[in-house]
Image (cartoon, rainbow, N blue to C red):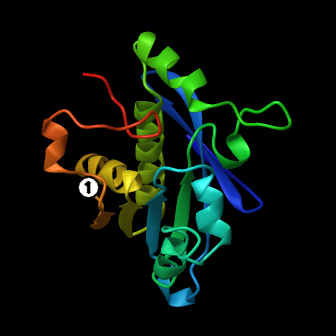
Amino acid sequence: LSSKKEGRYIEIYYTYKQKKDTVFAYLKKTIKQSNNNLGVLVIPGSGINQSTSIFYKNDINKNYQSNIDDIVQNYGDVYILVKPNEDFLAIHNGEKKIAESSFVNYLINQGSSYSAYYFIQSLALSKYIEKKYKRTIVTGLSQGGYVALLNALQSKPNKAIIASGFSILFDNPHQSGHNQFIVPG
């Protein structure tokens, strides 16, 4: 529907099934002026406040995905998806952020899914990027790689960089926690 830049992040307003919503992303402009025809979507992997870690840090010794934006920023503008209840979108009491155990099961029991929600947000962000740029890339690492794969199958970017995240073992029972991608059915 529309967008609004607020400091280091962008708000994008969209509709899904006749309901209005907002997706947030950190935005890093390309380093090279000649590369303003490419928009890159970075989907963070699991972990607490990963969008902020990706945006502000570039030391992979401290965070395995922290420099992905620095690498792709040479090629185009970078949009780092901010998941619900993460980073500046966190629901908290002033001291602690609400735990996943407080909402993941609740949403599943209501026939919904936290994972599906941020996947839909990633698609809305992809559509925004596709309208704004001649070429698009969707990228993700680990859990973000899995979501990037699902996103790329739907959004059909010019390129997709998917590092880990999906396994043929998903066809069999496997162990994972509430912090992993969960879409019932």
Instruction: Report the residue that reaches farthest toward the front.
Output: 175
- The residue at 52%/22% (across/down) is 19
For the residue marked with disc 1, what is the amino acid?
Lys
Q: Position of residue 176 (x, y in %)?
A: 35, 38
Judge whether 134 appears above or below 86 on screen: below
Which of the 4 quarters of the picture holds residue 184? top left
Q: How many marks?
A: 1
Q: Position of residue 138 (x, y in %)?
A: 37, 61
Quarter the C terminus occupies = top left
Judge whether 79 appears above or below 16 on screen: below
- The residue at 49%/56% (across/down) is 44
- The residue at 30%/63% (across/down) is 162
Which of the 4 quarters of the picture holds residue 62? bottom right
Instruction: Report the residue that reaches farthest toward the top.
Output: 110
Quarter the N terminus occupies = top right
- The residue at 43%/19% (across/down) is 112
Drawn side of residue 119 relative to residue 81, left or right: left
Q: Residues within 10 Å of mark 1 (few under 14, many from 20)?
A: some
Q: Nearer the viewer, residue 42 or 126?
A: 42
Instruction: Report the residue that reaches farthest toward the right.
Output: 94
Drawn side of residue 136 relative to residue 93, left or right: left
Q: Position of residue 171 (x, y in %)?
A: 13, 37
Q: Which residue is mark 1?
A: 156
Label 1 SS:
loop
Judge whether 184 appears above or below 147 on screen: above
Judge whether 185 appears above or below 130 on screen: above
